[in-house]
Image: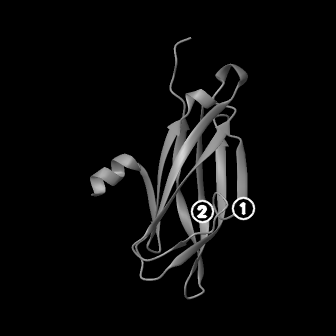
Amino acid sequence: MPNIMNALFPYAATTRDITVRVSVSFLPEQSTPDRGQWFWAYHIRVENGGAMAAQLMTRRWDIADGRGAHHTVEGDGVIGEQPVIAPGESYDYVSGCPLATPTGSMQGSYRMVGEDGSSFDVVIPKFALTAPVTAG
C-alpha cells in the first residue's frame, strides 16, 4: 500500500514511530487573487506505528509566503482536539491556510505525550503551497 499512500499523501515524515502524512489542495473558490488572497486546504494523517498510545498535545507551524516572510502559529491540539492515537491507529483532520502570495510553504511539529508520560516532538514535513498559474 505504500504507493497508494505516497500518491494520496505526497509529503511524509516519521519521528519515533509516529508518521505524519500531508496532502494539500489549492481552493480557487475561496481565493481572490485580484485582492491578493490565496487559500489552501491541507489534509493531515497522523499514524501511530509504535507500541504505545500517544496524545497530540500542541502544534507549531512555520508558514512562509512567496516573498520569504515567515509566520509562526502555535496552539493546543489540532482543530480543537487533542487526540489520543492508539498503536496501529491513525488520526485525520483537514485545515486551511491563507496567504497573500500565490506560493509558499508550511512545516512544523506536534508535541506528543506517550502513555508512559514521555513527551516528544514529531516533525510535520515541509510542504509546498502553490496556486496553479493562470493566463492573464
**Three-letter residue code for mark 1:** Gly
Q: How is the structure coloured here?
A: one colour
At a point 44% along the width and 56% down the height, the residue shown is 12
Residue 47 visible, this orientation: no
> Residue 74 sits in which quadrant?
bottom right
Residue 75 vertical position relative to residue 100 in the rendered view, above or below: below
The secondary element bearing badge 1 is classed as: strand
Residue 54 vertical position relative to residue 8 in the rendered view, above or below: below
Percent x, y for residue 124?
54, 59
List the residue tagged with mark 2. 109
Quadrant occupied by the C terminus: top right
The secondary element bearing badge 2 is classed as: strand
Percent x, y for residue 98?
66, 38
* Distance between mark 2 and mark 1 Cα atoms: 11 Å
List the residue tagged with mark 1. 75
Q: Earlier in the sequence, mark 2 or mark 1?
A: 1
At a point 72% along the width and 48% down the height, the residue shown is 71
Quadrant occupied by the N terminus: bottom left
At a point 56% along the width and 33% down the height, the residue shown is 27
At a point 51% along the width and 50% down the height, the residue shown is 43
Percent x, y for residue 76?
70, 65
Q: Residues within 10 Å of mark 1 (few under 14, many from 20)?
A: few
Point out the residue furthest to the top here. Answer: 136
* Image-based side of 1 in relation to 42, left or right: left
Question: Relative to the observer, which residue lies in front, 67 or 22?
Answer: 22
Camera-near label (2 vs 1) is 1
Q: Residues within 10 Å of mark 2 (few under 14, many from 20)?
A: some
**Three-letter residue code for mark 2:** Ser
